[in-house]
Amino acid sequence: MSALATPSVFLDLLARDAAAIEYDGPVVAARVAGAGAEELAALEAAKRVALEVRATLARSRRREAELVALFETAGDLAALRDLDAVLKAIVTRAHTLIGADVTYLTLDDPDRGDTYMRVTHGSVSARFQSLRLPMGAGLGGLVAQTAKPYVTSDYPRDSRFRHTNEIDEGVGEEGLTAILGVPLVLGSRVIGVLFAANRSARPFARHEITLLSSLAAHAAVAIDNARLLQATRDALSELRSANELVRAHSESVERAAAVHDKLADLVLRGGDVEGIAAAVAEAVGGGLVVVDADGVVTAVAGETSGFDDAGAGGRAGSGAGGRAGAGAGGDAESAIDVIAGVVRSGPLSTAASATGLIATSAATGHAARSGDLVVAAVAAAAEPLGALILRAPESFSDVDQRILERAALVVALHLLMRRSEAEAAERLGGDLLDDLLAVPVRHTSTLAERARRVGVDLDRPHIVVAADAAPADRPRAHFAAGRLAKSEGGLAGSHEGRIVLLLPGDDPAPAAQRVLAALRSGLAHPVTVGAGGPKSDVAAYADAHAEAVRCLGALHALGRAGCAAAPSDLGFLALVLGGGDPGAVVRKALGPLVDYDAKRGTDLLGTVEQYFACGRSLGRTGEALHIHVNTVTQRLDRTARLLGPDWQEPGRSLEIQLALQVRRVMGL
């Protein structure tokens, strides 16, 4: 045996890490040399032992490499602070360690109860990269549900898993066959799944499963650390922001309180809206316009360049506290829009009109802003009183906005105080109005003197207007009525539970419409208005008031709440209600025919009356009047030219027929 190879030759092979095929060389050489069976058996036994030692050494080296790789991976993951970087490092390291074609990671979605594809490495399919895996579906869903590793060498044909079309199509498009999935477990909770996959059928060895599981365990901790770190950073950022906010808020509260104290002091010392506007403009900068509830400019302050001509809405003076007035009765919305257009440096868009911003501010209780235009509504409870319109400077801040909002409250307080003063004065006029409408009227000589003291001339004809308003709207309606009465040289007050005005004039119909327009602005409920008169005798004012009340009753009975009417507007209904002048009703309906017959000596009235009596038959009308049917036609054509082409329409013809009957019965 000394001439042949000995078992020690295998030690040399082990020492130089020879390939496994080289271990057959000594046995083959001995067999060729004619070694005996005993020697050959000894060599075979030595070869088997040497190969086992070689395999053990290979496994040790591989394990050593894996441990080194895991150690390096743990170091890499520990050094990372960004969650996205952590996830990419996990998938990339898995791809390197396992040597798979594709590695990918899914994370748990607690809101939807499934897992979603978060990071992939080696993937080429967009569908696969957007897959979501329901709990229990597919290999990954089963791993997430059971928190156990699963492996398959041929996923498409493996019946152990619950296949879904969506998952199978995604896996098929990626071309994957063998898949290994291990859970990312944190405590007792699965937070995701780490996968290694190949595009050919091959089993994953136990050590590969162990390796990927070890990497997944490191990854779970790294992911949790990254999340905790991010949460800590977010908390610190929120704390810094909160600290800055508290400091800024404290400063803003102190500044706003100082301005508010100054404004309150102005009001208590008898200041007016102009003074308040000047103080606000000085505090926040920019140019400020104050308007009342009807859009009339009441004050301008601050940077007033551009306010010299406020257009149709009014004229604004220059300088802080400059006065501005708008024409009475003008369109309030147009006035506000003109003013707002001047306040801004450019044209005002429809969507951000001043009226829209005022409505927004009133609804929210805060100033509304569009560009450099800031509007704060002035209101008392739900009642609009006006607005502050500011052209804000570039330095305008939230603190300045709160100052503007506080200024709006101060202006509201000032206006309410002025209203209280006005109401006290109106009560004096209301007492006079009660005495004028009393039945019977007493002390007529003193009434005329009292009226002159408040600027009312009872020698002129007057109209009495009565209005019904909802209880919640009465304070504002009373205020508007007093303002209108003062502007027209009349009186306003309450009488028998209604708002009543005594206005100079000789036509109650337009007076009723004027009162309706003045009272209904800004009210939450409809206001109904009736008018009576005119009357020149003080003793007849009570009759005019009764006419107005009857008109109100008629409007309510007809379902016309929110409208205005005088007896002439109601026509024959005024007679039915007992409150109209028969002659006026007949005159309104038949006046042109009466005048024509009187001037020409014709009988159009008789022809029209007979025409209606004969059921609108031309032939029977001609027979009754003993005239040719052509003559009847000519007379009716003349009637149409005098009364209008609609005189035979149902509503108009009814009015004409009733007027004819009244005329005949009363001999008018």
Image (cartoon, grey):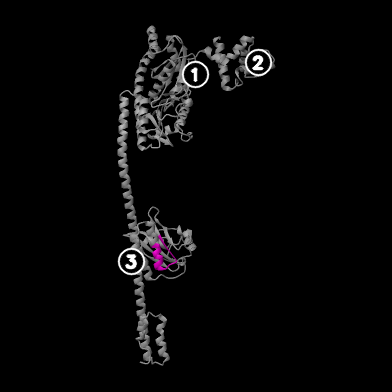
Say which element carries label 1.
helix
User: Mark 1: which amino acid?
Assistant: Pro
Spatial distance from mark 3 to mark 2, Cα to Cα?
Answer: 118 Å
Asked if disc 3 and disc 2 are in contact, CB closer than 8 Å, the reply is no
Q: Residues within 10 Å of mark 1 (few under 14, many from 20)?
A: some
How far across and down, in percent of the image, does residue 657 sit? 57, 17
Quarter holding the N terminus? bottom left
Disc ID at residue 198: none
Q: Is residue 3 above or below residue 205?
A: below
Q: Residues within 10 Å of mark 3 (few under 14, many from 20)?
A: some
Front residue of 529 and 462: 462
Can residue 172 be seen here? The reply is yes
- In the picture, residue 438 is in which quadrant? top left
Mark toward the start of the polypeptide (3 vs 1): 3
How far across and down, in percent of the image, does residue 437 sit? 40, 13
Quarter holding the C terminus? top right
The residue that appears at 33% across and 52% down in the rendered structure is 231
Q: Which residue is mark 3?
A: 71
How far across and down, in percent of the image, does residue 12 sit? 36, 83
Q: Is residue 204 above or below residue 436?
A: below
Q: Which residue is mark 2?
A: 635
> Which is closer to the viewer, label 2 or label 1?
1
Magenta stretch: includes residue 493: no
Question: Which residue ends up furthest to the top in the rendered image?
Answer: 445
Q: Which residue is mark 1?
A: 510
Front residue of 75 and 319: 319
Residue 189 is left or right of residue 587, and the answer is: left
User: Mark 2: which amino acid?
Assistant: Arg
- In the picture, residue 430 is in which quadrant? top left
